[in-house]
Image: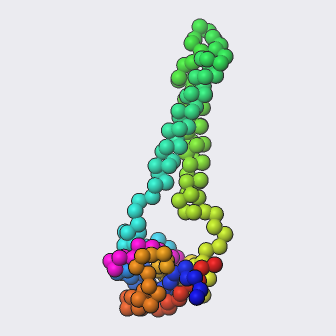
Amino acid sequence: MANHWGIVAEFESPAAIYHAAEKVTAQGYTKVDAHTPFPVHGLDKALRQGPSHLGWIVVCCGAMGIFLAQLMMYWMNAVDYPFWVSGKQPYAWPTTIPITFELMVLLSAFGAVFGMFGINKLPRLHHPIFNHSQIHRATDDRFFLSIESTDPKFDRNATAKLLESIGAKHIELLEDA
């Protein structure tokens, strides 16, 4: 028996996929995703997707940039090589603001890029959903709802019947690559 990745159903309109997502999640399915040619307002709530954690990763990386910049400049200017210029103390925090800002932005950008890679489990060179015969239409004019076989409620026959009962036009069972 082949190892199945999940099931994909095709819908013809944004309203149809929105209502399908509501009905599928109301039945208790949790590993559900939508593939649409444009953002559908409210679809993330219908799929019961929580907020992204990427913002917290970026904030933490930015705070780490501020801390590391201040620590680095304190060490270089006040401890390692103190140098008195015009009677001013070796470490004065106002002079460190430009470098602090730049390191904060740099580490925040790295946090955003690599955090997004981690959250999205990238890079993945091939995804089983690309084996669907019509998935290329998700970038043009069709709306797809996928349910992974790792979902606790997944049963290939019962899930297919549910999707058919809520208006799916084309239902396809996908094998794992």
Point 37% across, 73% down: residue: 46
Instruction: Pick the residue in front: 161 or 54.
Output: 161
Q: Is residue 31 magenta?
A: yes
Q: Picture quarter containing residue 49?
A: bottom left
Q: Picture quarter containing residue 80?
A: top right
Q: Is residue 18 left or right of residue 97?
A: left
Magenta highlight range = 25-37
Q: Is residue 175 visible?
A: yes
Point 58% across, 31% down: residue: 69
Point 57% across, 27% down: residue: 71
69 versus 17 height, above or below = above
Q: Quadrant of the N terminus?
A: bottom right
Q: Position of residue 136 (x, y in %)?
A: 60, 82
Q: Position of residue 61 (x, y in %)?
A: 53, 43
Q: Picture quarter containing residue 177?
A: bottom right
Q: Is residue 100 magenta?
A: no
Furthest residue in direction front, as rendered: 1
Point 62% across, 83% down: residue: 131
